[in-house]
């Protein structure tokens, strides 16, 4: 199957990157026992962003490849090393792209170079245990998990941004008109529906430059899906003015300029939203003798209806200059009526849901309770349930949020099933109010009592250090050979090598003192 070169409507599937998990780590360094938590945070997942690119004119790239995925964030590491963030995926779209959900809800209308829409937000990285430490939780033995990135299915629809739109029956000469007043070279042939895609041309009239869009031909019933017009009528919704291109040389039975104009106006009215656009009427192909006579016959009636009428010929270029300047006049007036555009780049992000932080409702058949809310569901996704301390931390957070109090208020009893979240990621708990869950250490959740008080070994070592310095300063008269002789192996917090060196030093000092004492006794005897 051939892939078209112009696509103005596609369905894309975007998936943001997952956030990296936080790291649970303890600083380890010689002579620094219990150095404290040093686990880094996980990196944020990459987002998928749609951005208007002036160099992109079609959505054909997403017709070929409709699945786009951002990269995941890296996991945190010890020594306070945070994980790298995932890279964002920026998708270029044409100016005038409308983004909506599969159900038809419009999320964004991107107009202007640089306008952005965050199609899928990357997941937040989990906190490491260094970030979770506090005055009441000095040594967390857990970290938070990274969040999943968003996954969405979006419909991208292109509405061409042009100043003037050309509408009319097939083979009325719309493409020929664009080719005659601009440098655009659309396909031109002598059969209906030659134009299958909108063609844009840049027109210069005096000091005014504007764009003209050639829309594929309309037929009666186009607004109801007949022909190709229904698919392309949206391309004239942004136009400042419409030009009816009417074929005055057609030989089809039942057609004439007035009935053609009425039919096209009926289809535009059925489509809706174009009633306020100024209209011009171009009576085309007056280079044909019969066509010129027909144009002269209907021109007066069209003027009576309030239209500005321009007999033209795209073959001989007769009347084109007047038509160009008339279009430029309307464009200048419409541009002046608009507010001055803001040059600030527009970035559209998903809306934050307001309202209460959570809600609790009873499940049918008294099977338990359902807790819903952005915070509780997010906290559940961040929790590593294989770690008892992490589960206790989740219980603390839910209690501070007021979930336990709300359940008691609604009549929940101990042992009732409590479901947090919907779908496959829901977690079921047994309701147990005021239960002290958490780490295995017999202390308050998340605390390590070894950081609060001196250990016995540290106290004994400090006493021995004081004793040693007292010997060195001569504050005691006892024999130094006694120093360290009565120490038990478990009274020092030294490695085996350090303990051996200390024992050798004490023995050497004792031998030196013994020699000095023997020499002194010999002198006393000889004296």
Image (tube, rainbow, N blue to C red):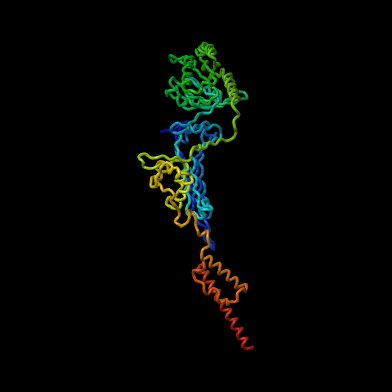
366 or 69, nearer to the observer? 366
Taking the spot 53% from the left edge, 28% from the top edge, the residue there is 161
**Residue 133 visible from this viewpoint:** yes
Image quadrant where residue 423 sits = top left
Residue that lies at the very extreme toward the left in this rendered image: 365
* Left or right of 90, for residue 426: left
Q: Locate residue 320, reporting x and y percent.
A: 56, 19
**Quarter holding the C terminus?**
bottom right
Q: Locate residue 300, reporting x and y percent.
A: 54, 11
Residue that lies at the very extreme toward the right in this rendered image: 527
286 or 518, nearer to the observer? 518
Image quadrant where residue 466 sits = bottom right
332 or 445, nearer to the observer? 445
* Left or right of 2, for residue 112: right
**Quarter holding the N terminus?**
top left
Q: Locate residue 277, reporting x and y percent.
A: 54, 21
Q: Locate residue 63, reporting x and y percent.
A: 45, 35
Tally of marks: 0
**Residue 65 visible from this viewpoint:** no
- 180 vs 300: above or below: below
């Amino acid at each position: 199957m051939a892939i078209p070169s112009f696509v103005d409507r596609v369905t894309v599937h975007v998936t943001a990157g997952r956030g990296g998990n936080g790291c649970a780590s303890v600083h380890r360094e010689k002579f620094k026992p219990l150095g404290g938590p040093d686990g880094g945070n996980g990196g944020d997942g990459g987002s998928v962003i749609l951005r208007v690119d002036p160099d992109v004119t079609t959505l054909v790239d997403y017709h070929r490849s409709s699945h786009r995925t951002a990269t995941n964030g890296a996991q945190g590491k010890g020594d306070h090393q945070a994980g790298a963030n995932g890279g964002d995926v920026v998708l270029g779209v044409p100016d005038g792209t409308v983004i909506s959900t599969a159900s038809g809800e419009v999320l964004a209308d991107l107009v202007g170079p640089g306008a952005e829409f965050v199609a899928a937000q990357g997941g937040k990285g989990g906190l490491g245990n260094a970030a979770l430490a506090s005055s009441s939780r000095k040594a967390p033995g857990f970290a938070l998990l990274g969040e999943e990135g968003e996954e969405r299915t979006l419909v991208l629809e292109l509405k061409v941004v042009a100043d003037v739109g050309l509408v009319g029956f097939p083979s009325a000469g719309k493409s020929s008109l664009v080719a005659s007043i601009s440098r655009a070279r659309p396909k031109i042939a002598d059969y209906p529906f030659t134009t299958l895609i909108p063609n844009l041309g840049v027109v210069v009239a005096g000091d005014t430059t504007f764009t003209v869009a050639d829309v594929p031909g309309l037929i009666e019933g186009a607004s109801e899906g007949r022909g190709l017009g229904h698919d392309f009528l949206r391309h004239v919704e942004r136009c400042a003015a419409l030009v009816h291109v009417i074929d005055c040389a057609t030989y089809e039975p039942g057609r004439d300029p007035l009935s053609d104009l009425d039919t096209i106006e009926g289809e535009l009215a059925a489509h809706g939203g174009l009633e306020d656009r100024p209209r011009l009427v171009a009576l085309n192909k007056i280079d044909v003798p019969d066509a010129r006579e027909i144009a002269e016959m209907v021109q007066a009636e069209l003027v009576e209806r309030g239209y500005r009428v321009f007999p033209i010929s795209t073959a001989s270029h007769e009347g084109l200059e007047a038509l160009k300047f008339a279009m430029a006049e309307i464009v200048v007036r419409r541009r002046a009526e608009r507010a001055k555009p803001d040059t600030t780049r527009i970035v559209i992000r998903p809306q934050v849901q307001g309202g209460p932080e959570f809600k609790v409702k009873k499940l049918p058949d008294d099977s338990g309770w359902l807790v819903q809310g952005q915070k509780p569901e997010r906290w559940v996704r961040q929790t590593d349930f294989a770690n008892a301390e992490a589960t206790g931390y989740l219980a603390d957070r839910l209690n501070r949020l007021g979930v336990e109090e709300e359940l008691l208020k609604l009549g929940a009893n101990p042992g009732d099933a409590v479901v947090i979240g919907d779908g496959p990621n829901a977690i079921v708990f047994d309701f147990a109010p005021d239960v002290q869950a958490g780490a295995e250490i017999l202390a308050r959740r998340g605390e390590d009592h070894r950081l609060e008080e001196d250990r016995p070994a540290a106290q004994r070592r400090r006493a021995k250090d004081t004793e040693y310095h007292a010997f060195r300063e001569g504050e005691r008269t006892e024999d130094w050979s006694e120093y360290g002789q009565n120490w038990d192996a478990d009274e020092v917090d030294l490695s085996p090598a350090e303990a051996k060196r200390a024992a050798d030093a004490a023995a050497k000092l004792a031998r030196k003192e013994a020699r000095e004492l023997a020499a002194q006794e010999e002198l006393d005897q000889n004296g």
